[in-house]
Image (cartoon, rainbow, N blue to C red):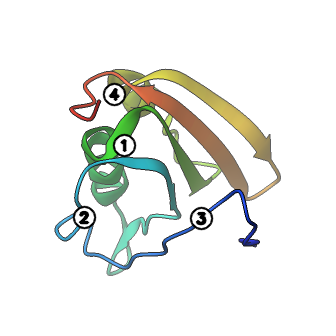
Amino acid sequence: TLVPSETCQWNVLQSSIYCNIKPGYDVVITNPPFHTHKQTNYDLGKQIVSQSATVLKPEGVLYLVGNIFLNYTEIGEKFFNEVEKLTRNLSYVVYKMSRPKNSQNS
């Protein structure tokens, strides 16, 4: 739940990956799809992780919700300096990936 406050401003954007997103964001929150028809395919999730590093500020954070059987740690470590699992249950994991390695946004 996003709760507006006087000290925090949120912009919620819909985009096909990041095609209409300009660099310079503090946070990206995503729950990427992992099916192509009936096949498991998390290439789109990997693309979202890699491209997040280009739209986030140097101290930016990507929060990603993924199914438990999809391991986003390895791809996260390629593009972010810090990757951690915030929480998990029997079905899902919430990842926090912060400080993009190749952020172009100062």
Q: CA distance from mark 4 to mark 1?
A: 11 Å
User: Which quadrant: the N terminus?
Assistant: bottom right
Q: Which numbered disc, 4 or 2, marks the residue that appears first in the sequence? A: 2
Q: Which residue is disc 1 drawn over?
A: 56
Image position of 29 (left or right of 56): right
Number of residues whose C-alpha sits closer than 10 Å to that of mark 4, classed few (under 14), some (14–19) or many (20 or more): many
Q: Position of residue 77 (x, y in %)?
A: 42, 23
Number of residues whose C-alpha sits closer than 10 Å to that of mark 1, classed few (under 14), some (14–19) or many (20 or more): many
Q: CA distance from mark 2 to mark 3?
A: 17 Å
Q: Nearer the viewer, mark 4 or mark 1?
A: 1
Which kind of residue does numbered mark 2 sit on? Ile
User: Which quadrant: the C terminus?
Assistant: top left
Q: Residue at x 79, y 43 (%)?
A: 87
Q: Which numbered disc, 2 or 3, marks the residue that appears first in the sequence? A: 3
Q: Which numbered disc, 4 or 1, marks the residue that appears first in the sequence? A: 1
Q: Which numbered disc, 2 or 1, marks the residue that appears first in the sequence? A: 2
Which kind of residue does numbered mark 4 sit on? Phe
Quarter where residue 36 is shown: bottom left
Number of residues whose C-alpha sits closer than 10 Å to that of mark 3, classed few (under 14), some (14–19) or many (20 or more): few
Q: Which residue is disc 2 drawn over?
A: 21
Q: Which numbered disc, 4 or 3, marks the residue that appears first in the sequence? A: 3
Q: Which residue is disc 3 drawn over?
A: 9
Q: CA distance from mark 4 to mark 3?
A: 26 Å
Q: Are marks 4 and 2 in contact (CB under 8 Å)?
A: no
Q: Which mark is residue 79?
A: 4
Image position of 93 (left or right of 98): right
Q: Nearer the viewer, residue 30 or 99?
A: 99
Compared to residue 11, the image places residue 81 above or below, namely above
Tell me the SS state at disc 4. Answer: helix
Q: Nearer the viewer, residue 2 or 45?
A: 2
Q: Nearer the viewer, mark 4 or mark 3?
A: 3
Quarter where residue 101 is shown: top left
